[in-house]
Image: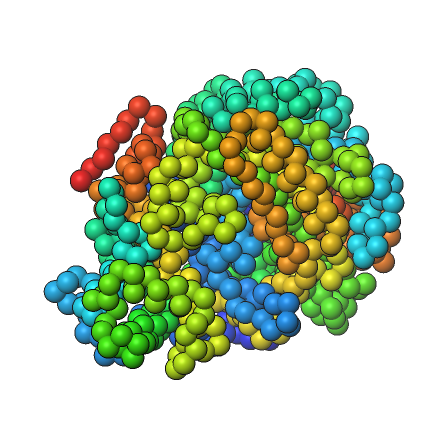
Amino acid sequence: MSKQHVNAVVVGAGAGGGVVAKELSLGGLSVVLLERGDWVSYDAHDHDELLSQRTTVLGNATGPDDVRYRRVVVNDDGSSDIVFPSEWAYNNVAACVGSGTVTYGAMAWRFMSEDFRMKTTYGHVEGSTMEDWPVTYDDLESCYEKAEWEIGVAGDASSNPFASPRKKPYPMPPFAYNKEASMLESAMKRRGLHPFPIPMLRNSVPYNGRPACVRRRTCCGFACPLDAKCGTQNTVIPAALSTGNCELRTNCLASELVIDGSGKITGVAYFDGDNTKHIQSADLVVIAASATESPRLLLNSRSKHFPAGVGNRHDWVGRNLQGHAYTGAFGLFDEDLFDDVGPGATIAISDFSHHNPGIIGGGILANEFTRMPYLFTGVRPPGSPTWGRAHKEFQRTYFRRNAQVVGPIQEMPVFDSRVQVDPTVMDFWGIPVARLSGHRHPKDAEGCEFLSRKAEMILKEAGAFHTWRHLPGLGLSGGQHQAGTCRMGNDPQTSVTDRYGRVHDTPNVFIADASLHVTNGGFNPALTIMALGYWVGGHISNEWQKGNRFT
Amino acid sequence: MKHTSKLSRREFMKRAALGAGTLTLIGGCATPDRSGRKFLSDDEASLMEAIAEQIIPADEWPGGRDAGVVAFVDKQLAGPYRRFQEDYRKGLAAITDSCLKQYRKKFEVLSLEQQTAVLKDLESGNYEDGVWGSGFSRRFFEMLRNHSLQGYYGSPRHGGNKKYVSYRMIGLDYPPVIGQNRYRS
């Protein structure tokens, strides 16, 4: 079935796609926004850890489901497994209106100037495709600002001396520290570090017609029952819809781009909630389906003009899959530190984000989100019993008497870490699934070793009587911070899009999600994805006003 | 697309039946029965109960048995954990077999120390005969351990954590609204 022609189809109503839909529809383009999931609310999971985005063992309350979705993960020995969304190896991102911005911990980091110029700052890294971005921090500064004001960030702009310069403060005051963070603040200061309240995409005061946060423990990993967490679902997407130019179609899964006989992209094919296939024709297509699903969509779009998939002439689509190597330390304390002030994570330092001797990049360190009872069963000093009487006693004694300091290490992109489409395994709709393979760069381990020692030092200074470090392995990366698989660049031979997210060789196809990231910063990436949404969407809208139809 | 969606869906369901498992009952378990269970037989349930009590033993707080871990596991095996049905049927039977061979007794009636020893053997992959080969022993133990902990520490609405026992044990207010502590029994 064919639908009435529109100016633009946006695939994916998450951090990037939601912003793009708003920018385009405000710019006067007619837009169809396709989202594979539905609107979700707190009722989908209630207070239930096992269904939340943090654990998911019994399924993802915010999607995708285990019945229709699957992926293939390639193991170190070359064998492969089919994995389901509720399994950790799937690298799930929420499938709902707002996507990860519904369930995220909502840290609102700007990357630093250095994060966009990694090669210039640190030089070539053997075995890595680390490169400078074709855009700079200064290019994106106003986009970050828009994200902070339109979507809503609470923070203290003056408190992080390492942050790159900004023009405007945050629209809302910062959140107060919880008990754990207050303790860590003194320890960090005694060590000469520069702690500050984490900027958060949550309302610290009533903002944008929605109430202030009441600081529940079930925040990170959960939809907010008060709508006090700011995502694209309660800000830019409603703004897009209210223009009258944007139609949101939920439960609609894009299967491939439609390519005509001359090699022009004319729209998107998708399955609706009744599994009926439709074609939505459009002047241009913006793909913002995540760093796994965006390359999958390009690779599943083939014709004689694009035998290896759209944008894949030089075999860069799906390459450089990266995430964050999370590292840090745990500490046990005599005193009760659990004040149940959610979402827990409130304090951070950026002292180790860059210019660490012998380390390429680095990462922030922050206190961890509120511990969840089942997740905490996996938090034990090395060598401790993992079940039985002592395991239970530990849970009882230390659930309220522990502190955790963790952070994301900026990973070195690896060309062979990648998303492909599987030759045999299909999803419910008969579309070839994503096939994930690869490994981290050995340098990431050095970064983790360095940063975790800093975390441990802070916990010791805070008075922990026992500490241990957490170091991730060098296996496949991705996770909810997945990025890099359709990188932007100035050279079409070593990138997938230009500096505005336009796919090389196709004048009317754009990417607007973390797939564009050349490198992924040492920060949670949500605000950067939103900023790229403003960057790409703003560019398209401006060009459209000037009469450019991207033909 | 090469495939029409109809054909692909049929193929998909075939794969799902092979891979993910379906509600089809494996083996000769008559369910649902008077116990209200959906998957585990009486014998399997009493074995699972003893295992759960080993994973989370009773001390001044109830253990896995009284917290309803078996109800949790049974409910999930008929739901999101359908894909583990075959492993449970095979693994629980093999635990009984191994105990009969080694002690001439079923797991449930062994001394607590003997039970611990059996589970430690499973955990370290010391059982290699029969179905235990190629890593199944470790994998099945990991499953029993994780699922027991989920039943004990997860939300009561899944069948375990009866009377919010684990939340009360660790001093966690529930529901998580500051100033409102309601332990429904």
Please tell me which residue lies in front, B48 or A271. Answer: B48
Please tell me which residue lies in front, A76 or B79. Answer: A76
**Residue located 64% across and 72% down the image:** A78
Please tell me which residue lies in front, A204 or B31. Answer: B31
In the rendered image of this protein, does residue A28 appear above or below residue B86?
A: above
**Residue located 28% across and 51% down the image:** B57
Coordinates of residue B71 in the picture (x, y in percent)? 24, 57
Q: Quarter of the image holding residue A264?
A: bottom right
Q: Quarter of the image holding residue A373?
A: top left
Tell me how many marks there are.
0
**Residue located 35% across and 64% down the image:** B117
User: In the visual, does A405 lie left or right of B141?
Assistant: right
The N terminus of chain B: image quadrant: bottom right
- For the question of whether residue A248 can be seen, the reply is no
**Residue located 80% across and 53% down the image:** A129
**Chosen colour scheme:** rainbow
Please tell me which residue lies in front, A193 or B27. Answer: A193
Coordinates of residue A548 in the picture (x, y in percent)? 78, 43
Q: Residue furthest left?
A: B34
User: In the visual, does A138 lie left or right of A203?
Assistant: right
The C terminus of chain B: image quadrant: top left
Coordinates of residue A248 in the picture (x, y in percent)? 52, 45
In the rendered image of this protein, does residue A435 appear above or below residue A197?
A: below
User: In the visual, does A31 lie left or right of A164?
Assistant: left
Coordinates of residue B167 in the picture (x, y in percent)? 31, 39
- For the question of whether residue A388 can be seen, the reply is yes
